[in-house]
Image (cartoon, rainbow, N blue to C red):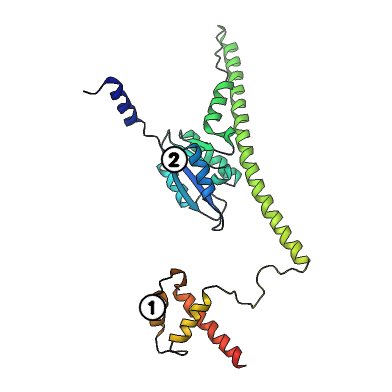
Amino acid sequence: MLKLTTVKRVMKGAFNLNKIYGYCRISTVKQNIDRQERNILQEYPNAIIIKEIFTGTKYQGRKELDKILRSVQAGDTIVFDSVSRMSRNADEGFALYKSLYDRGINLVFLKEHHIDTDVYKNELERQRLNVSVQSGDKATDALMNAILEALNNYILALAEKQIQLVFIQSQKEVDDLHQRTREGIETARRNGKQIGQKAGRKLKVKKATPIKEMILKYSRDFNGTNTDDEVKAIINGNPDPKLHIGHNAYYKYKRELREELNDDKS
């Protein structure tokens, strides 16, 4: 027979179904997402890590985050490395925070723990005036209770304002970064530096050379006897997937080869 303590542990585990999600997002493929994952797992080793690569500033349309928002239940927790990972748009970020808080979802921000939903909730409970005036005079009681309710609403508004300010600061940091980047590019341009690729200059891709060599060798339009489909099959049969090619890129390389050959003849 199971001991009573064992039964209690089993029952507790059976009903403790709350999940912890760790949401990691990077804005470009050049960024490294591992740091966010490492930070989250350090504090929440059992977190379910959800990764997403997304370019943009709105949380709508982020497929993996949307999946979490649809499946998350009251009592579940979503952990972000920082506020900027949830949203860099202040209004939308704050609206999402409020929506999840009202649903009973716990939010944790590793770099801004002071606005975690648990901290927000505890601060509201600490400051809330739980007083009911019953003087015996209905008019006095109504007035005093209305004043107390107004004070509690004021406390709530102050707490919300502190959270909103964090989202505003996060958006400001992103906007400032973009502005500094634009200014840096403009300064470099004014100093005569080339920004981006010169007009008419072809971008050299590492895999272009070996692929063009295969097109020259096998295509019947050049030195070979094979059709376009056959040449593409030969190229994509290469054991190195980095040298595989799609339909549009294949014809782009063929066009460039013709231009290069014509240049050589002129």
Tell me where residue 6 appears, x and y as whole percent. 29, 24
- For residue 137, above or below residue 190: above
Amino acid type, residue under disc 2 in the picture: Ala
> Camera-side residue: 180 or 141?
180
Q: Which residue is mark 1?
A: 233
Quadrant that contains the N terminus: top left
Q: Residue furthest bottom?
A: 265
25 displayed left or right of 151? left
Q: Position of residue 119 (x, y in %)?
A: 55, 29
Determine whether 233 is above or below 178 in the image.
below
Q: CA distance from mark 2 to mark 1?
A: 44 Å
- Amino acid residing under circle 1: Ala
Residue occupying the point 47% across, 75% down: 248
**Which element carries disc 1, helix, strand or loop?**
helix
Q: Is residue 254 above or below residue 109?
A: below
Q: Quadrant of the C terminus?
A: bottom right
Q: Which mark is residue 123?
A: none
Tell me if I can see residue 61 in this picture.
Answer: no
Image-quadrant location for residue 167: top right
Mark 2: secondary structure? loop
Task: Say left or right for 69 vs 256.
Answer: left
Residue at the image point whose x is 55% and y is 82% from the top: 256
- x, y percentage for residue 7? 28, 24
Kindly give the residue lying farthest to the top in the view shown.
Answer: 136
Mark 1, other Cα within 10 Å: few <14 / some 14–19 / many ≥20: few
- Tell me the crowding category of disc 2: few under 14, some 14 to 19, or many 20 or more residues within 10 angstroms, Cα based: some
Disc marking residue 47? 2
Of the numbered discs 2 and 1, the one sitting upstream in the chain is: 2
Image spot of residue 33 (x, y percent): 52, 51
